[in-house]
Image (spheres, rainbow, N blue to C red):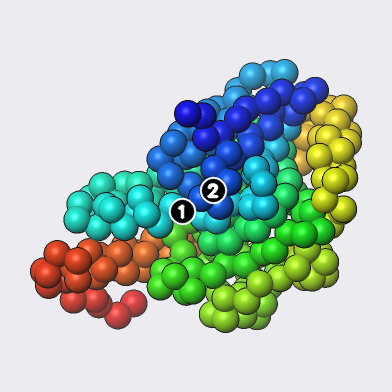
Amino acid sequence: MTTVALTRRGAALWARIDRPGAGNACDSTVLAGLERWLAGAADPDVRVLVLTGTGRSFCAGADLAEATGLLGDLPALLAHLDRGRRLVRGIRAAPVPTVAAVNGAAFGGGLELLLACDLAVAADSARLGDRHLAVGQVPGWGSSVLLPLAVGPALARRLLITGETWSADESVRRGLVSAAVPDDHLVGHVDALADAVAALDATAVRRMLGLARPMPDEAAWDREWATLTAHVTAQAAVRTGSTPPAETPD
């Protein structure tokens, strides 16, 4: 079963996560499909990458059922989570512009996928938030790194700590997405946006990406990953009845 549908629309390569029954959560098959989508940017005829979802969700984040099932195999769990982390960082470094067509709810890792993209357009019905704490987790795919760059440190802390949800309109006002459009206009709006970008000089666009993409401190990525590793290690210890290593202060 294909959980990520890849479609060429003009010069844009669209990836549509297709697990609506699971909120389009990222399991291993979705990560593999998104890796194929990202690799598609190597095709010189692909000038834009677009990411969207099926149904009422853009992406609900990492698949908690799969992650929970890996608690008994900590190295496998960390490798799975690191795979998502590397995907997000790969999207941020893509050689062509990336666009999130946010068709619905974007939470946790779904928000992190959105933050990885250069541009984000939300359908009016979309709802966005971090919400890691709502499921007893901490981010590992970039929320703590990328949110402050998108909305500023104060609002980033608000989203991370409260777990509140923003509407599409509020997400525009706060700078989390660039536009909100009626649900039935989303694909057409993003098509027009992708076509406009694809018509520009490819070399100039590539160089502009190097200027326009904010560059977070590498230490921020390291701190987030160290925090996630400590957190899931402690959870795995509870599951197996072992004693986790003592955490040391930063």
Residue at (58%, 39%) from the top-left corner? 18
Query: Which disc number belongs to residue 62?
Result: 1
Residue type at mark 1: give it.
Ala
Query: Seen from this angle, which residue lies furthest front?
Result: 21
Residue 55 location in percent, x, y? Answer: 67, 46
Residue at (54%, 80%) from the top-left corner? 161
Residue 160 location in percent, x, y? Answer: 55, 74
Q: Is residue 34 left or right of residue 28?
A: right
Q: Is residue 197 visible?
A: no
Residue 242 location in percent, x, y? Answer: 11, 69
Q: Is residue 151 visible?
A: yes
Which secondary structure lies at badge 2?
A: helix
First in sequence: mark 1 vs mark 2: 2
Which secondary structure lies at badge 1?
A: loop
Give the number of callouts.
2
Q: Nearer the viewer, residue 180 or 248?
A: 180
Residue 56 location in percent, x, y? Answer: 67, 52
Question: What residue is shown with label 2?
Answer: 21
